[in-house]
Amino acid sequence: MTKPARSKPATSKSGPARVLSSRISYQGPVFSVTTDEVEEPGGVRARRDVIRHSGSIVILAVEDPAAGGPAKASPKAEARILLERQYRHAAQSMMWELPAGRIDDGETALTAAKRELLEETGYRARQWKRILHFYVSPGFLDETMTIYLARDLQSGEAQPEPDERITVRFFSLTEAKRMALNGRIRDAKTISGILWLAEKARPARQAASR
């Protein structure tokens, strides 16, 4: 359920805008739209239509080389990232993405992340770490996304929603990064998570090559 629109307090010119009026223009099951008349920092008065959203979580689920299997014996082995492929109507295409979902009422971000990982992929993780938090598109949308790094994975049975048709697959970090940079992955949250992991992995690779 979408959280109701919130009136924002009047502040100094260096802070948030002063809301002169606000009304809900649209109320849906996932988000609402408010039409606000505001006075922004610097004295600019304008109408702003804002999509209100309860916030989302993203899971960067990683299988480390030390987890076992043939990769364990190879000195060049690298982490593998769990991606899912599904149809996105707004983009009119199938897309590779990190698992993600909305934070429901009464949930913490971490609780939502654990629930979404299990529902969409069947995996659970023993280790969780919050790594990134950002606005999706702050020009007209107040949704934030929190990315969690999930490690020490255990497989299980997925529990997708009735309207979800999801395929899951592990990709090596090198391949996932290549997909992000050559346009095969076009989802912003997924690109952010992959490039974060690639940056964190650089010191380890550099040390191993010496």
Image (cartoon, rainbow, N blue to C red):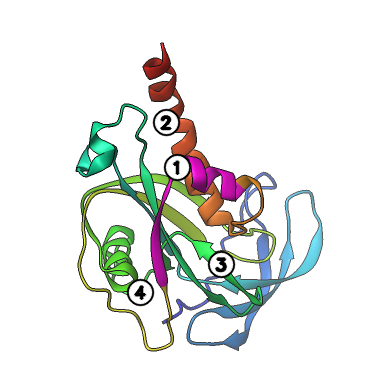
Q: Amino acid at mark 4?
A: Asp
Look at the numbered disc 4 and give the secondary structure of its residue: loop
Q: Earlier in the sequence, mark 1 or mark 2?
A: 1
**Which disc, if any, is residue 201?**
2
- Asked whether 167 or 146 is in front, the reply is 167
What residue did someone put label 3 on? Answer: 95
Q: Earlier in the sequence, mark 2 or mark 4?
A: 4
Q: From mark 2 to mark 3, how far is it between C-alphas?
A: 25 Å
Q: Position of residue 30 (x, y in %)?
A: 49, 81
Q: Which residues are magenta?
A: 167-180
- Say if the magenta span includes residue 171: yes
Q: Position of residue 65 (x, y in %)?
A: 28, 38
Q: Earlier in the sequence, mark 3 or mark 1?
A: 3
What residue did someone put label 4 on? Answer: 104
What residue did someone put label 1 on? Answer: 173
Q: Earlier in the sequence, mark 4 or mark 3?
A: 3
Residue 63 higher or lower than 57, as above or below? above
